[in-house]
Image (tube, rainbow, N blue to C red):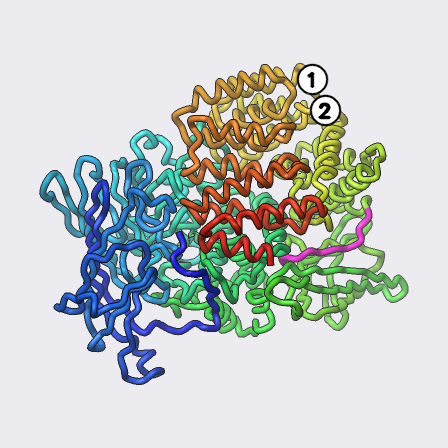
Amino acid sequence: MRTEQPKMIYLKDYQAPEYLIDETHLTFELFEDHSLVHAQLVMRRNPARILESGGGLPPLVLDGQQLELLSVSLGDRELTAADYQLSANHLTLQPASESFTVDTSVKIHPESNTALEGLYKSSGMFCTQCEAEGFRKITYYLDRPDVMSKFTTTVVAEQHSYPVLLSNGNPIASGPGEDGRHWATWEDPFMKPAYLFALVAGDLWCVEDSFTTMNQREVALRIYVEPENIDKCQHAMTSLKKSMRWDEQTYGREYDLDIFMIVAVNDFNMGAMENKGLNIFNSSAVLARAETATDAAHQRVEAIVAHEYFHNWSGNRVTCRDWFQLSLKEGFTVFRDAGFSSDMNSRTVKRIQDVAYLRTHQFAEDAGPMAHAVRPESFIEISNFYTLTVYEKGSEVVGMIRTLVGAEGFRKGSDLYFERHDGQAVTCDDFVKAMEDANGIDLAQFKRWYSQAGTPRLAVSEAYDAAAKTYSLTFRQSCPQTPDKVEKLPFVIPVELGLLDAKGAAIALRLAGEATAQGASRVISVTEAEQTFTFVDIAEQPLPSLLRGFSAPVKLSFPYNRDQLMFLMQHDSDGFNRWDAGQQLAVQVLQDLIAQHQQGQALVLDQRLVTALATLLADDSLDQAMVAEMLSLPGEAYLAEISEVADIEAIHTAREFARQQLADSLFDGLWKRYQANREVSRTTDYVAESAHFARRALQNIALSYLMLTEKPQVLAAAIEQFDAADNMTERLTALAVLVNSPFEAEKAKALAVFAEHFKDNALVMDQWFSVQAGSTLPGGLERVKALMQHKAFNIKNPNKVRALIGAFAGQNLINFHAADGSGYRFLADLVIQLNGFNPQIASRQLAPLTRWRKYDSARQALMKGELERIRASGELSSDVFEVVSKSLA
Ligand code: B3K
Ligand code: ZN
């Protein structure tokens, strides 16, 4: 797997390339037992480097891995072995002039490529994944994002098995070949780095549509899938058209080629890839229809289609100079897709979901051994840096810039960025500079968000002076040390806030020194380690609403009591903070229960939580999706993240106790809402739209509480919903509640019926695996092991690994963290196995073990022992090596 000792690469060592590749002409000859790749590279010395390092001609060092070199020519001259050096990762030549061409022919083996990087086969079709460094597994090249080239690609394959031949750009010629073969040539007029290259050859059908751009250009839209999936593309197509329009309206970005294609493949290491004009998607991120995909899956498809499409500007037209700048395209594009999803659905609900995810998973990453800055300063394996920090925290950083410069200023900044850097490979600094220049501001201190890892803490205290009518808030910020840095300098933390009076009304906000009040919700910037803001004309002791909309990715603390939190839940004008007040209330109540359990006391639930949720449930005027979110208790993983030492057993017991108590106490309200919503579902057709998502969300969370009561009418309702639902959202929830229930016969029957009905649909079977892997009833590991023997399971398929093993280790905490270490041993065995054929997936699955410092000493020893066993298990990929060695450091 590994071909050289893994070594650390540093941002500070960046140098521009010695040579450029103006044109890249590729010919692929695809066969069943090998493929041939012929590359002609039209190259020249990089003028920027001539100035720097004088006129001599340095050697040309091309990247290449796992390639069998058949021939290499420099200009017209075919080279012999004496003319070049070949190592495991490089081909080195000595050019004789400043401009020249290099021709290579290599043999590769896509048919046995299980790492799913480079050119590989999935369900009989050829496809590619080149980001970040997969192109070097296809041909010798300068495989780095700052080398941009114009690509022409010819694909030759057997016609019957591979009628469809695709690559980036526009099709310019095609025809029959010899021996039942045929060929097609594609030309991409836009300069691009190799990581955006794509090729597809297969027996695919396509759904076609078209889009008229803002400048009246017609763009052909095609989604290619295996024939049996042709009925599951409409949602992705609709999402694509919405994305194209939204990017015109919101960012002024128009699509630039005459054709835009999406291809769905079954074996894919992540969600999707933004290759120029030819996006390649995990089929789970394209295919969706009511009967087979949940509401969440529909929303995920919409978001990923948008994300990859938006990359056409934020990533492709303007790309990254080097991989340390990954968040330049990923953070910005996540920010763009979140804006899109907010506009298509509910802004507040989208924000709640994103923040809950960030706080649970990114905060944990920031507190673990792999913590890194949004722009890391070093890495061993770039594949390990497609992280929540680069993506989600990176998006928060862009969001804070928007908060600081305002919506209009942000648009001016993004216009300037795209205009100034179109066709270039740039850095995060260039992005910030465009924002600064467009708005005439200085973001120098703000840029610490790019370079300092760790989640800042912001402790807030208040002081009210009734005589002077002043109210002061004092902010103290700090940032824990992370593996990369001990000392942290203060961040710029935009805090949106408001003050509520005793009736819940907003108080006008005038800071000392200001002539007039500046609205009732405003943003203040905390820039120092400690800073006090004093509001004047405050006639009564107010209640602050802080960090509205989660205006910065920090851990804010303010000493609210439970009555104040209940008050905010009802009266805060900011929907996000209403939800967050409920979460803080629930956290306090759950932490009581956790402590009671740890001290061997009887558990007693603070009834204020019941009262608060009962009030929400009774209010028909509230957005049902909000009610569903507010009824969801903080997850076990989040409760673990905020614990000093995560006592999973106590967390699980406490949370389940609270859920049970809520179910019993709120039965009537839940049952009423459940029945009313189920009745609408029963009598209307499925629609994948916001209001319907909201109704089903409330219906389903109600059902999952109700089922805890084990009442016969609820069991009957769950079975009715399972049998009669016309959509996967309702059916899967019904299955999940049965799987987590003690009704063994009904559970077994539902699982069997479901598997029989959907046995030919891999994506639905993934959901069937996940529901069982997530069941927290005792015996979880044995169930997972048994499911690995199921004929629908395939360890080579990343979706299956994620659905079964990822769901078990990531969501089924009580079983994964079994005191005997069986869960850890199981995961380590799996990682060792995956390391042998798919390092990227191996490294991802390893994440839960890296968090070993969070647990009690017995578990720490067990987890660490498994990491050591992995380290000693033989030759590790650079992916697994980096994560294991950093975790043990
Ligand atoms: N840019 C790709 C991610 C590639 C991951 C490579 N290991 C998908 C995305 O973020 O849009
Ligand atoms: Zn992306």
Residue 778, position in %: x, y? 65, 28
Residue drawn at the location 45% of the way across and 35% of the way down: 800
Residue type (three-letter) at the residue carrying disc 2: Phe
How far apart are labels 1 and 2 at the CA level? Answer: 10 Å
* Mark in the foreground, 1 or 2: 1
Residue type (three-letter) at the residue carrying disc 1: Lys
Residue 724, position in %: x, y? 51, 18
- Closest to the observer, 554 or 453: 453
Specify whether residue 335 is in view: no
Residue drawn at the location 40% of the way across and 50% of the way down: 308
Residue drawn at the location 43% of the way across and 20% of the way down: 757
Q: Residue furthest right?
A: 467
- How would you classify the magenta stretch by its main secondary structure? loop
Residue indicated by mark 2: 667
In the figure, residue 415 lies in which quadrant?
A: bottom left
Q: Quadrant of the C terminus?
A: bottom right
Residue drawn at the location 28% of the way across and 71% of the way down: 60
Residue 711 shows which numbered tag?
Answer: 1
- Closest to the observer, 547 or 871: 871
Q: Residues within 10 Å of mark 2 (few under 14, many from 20)?
A: some
Residue 529, position in %: x, y? 72, 69
Marks 1 and 2 close (CB-CB < 8 Å): yes
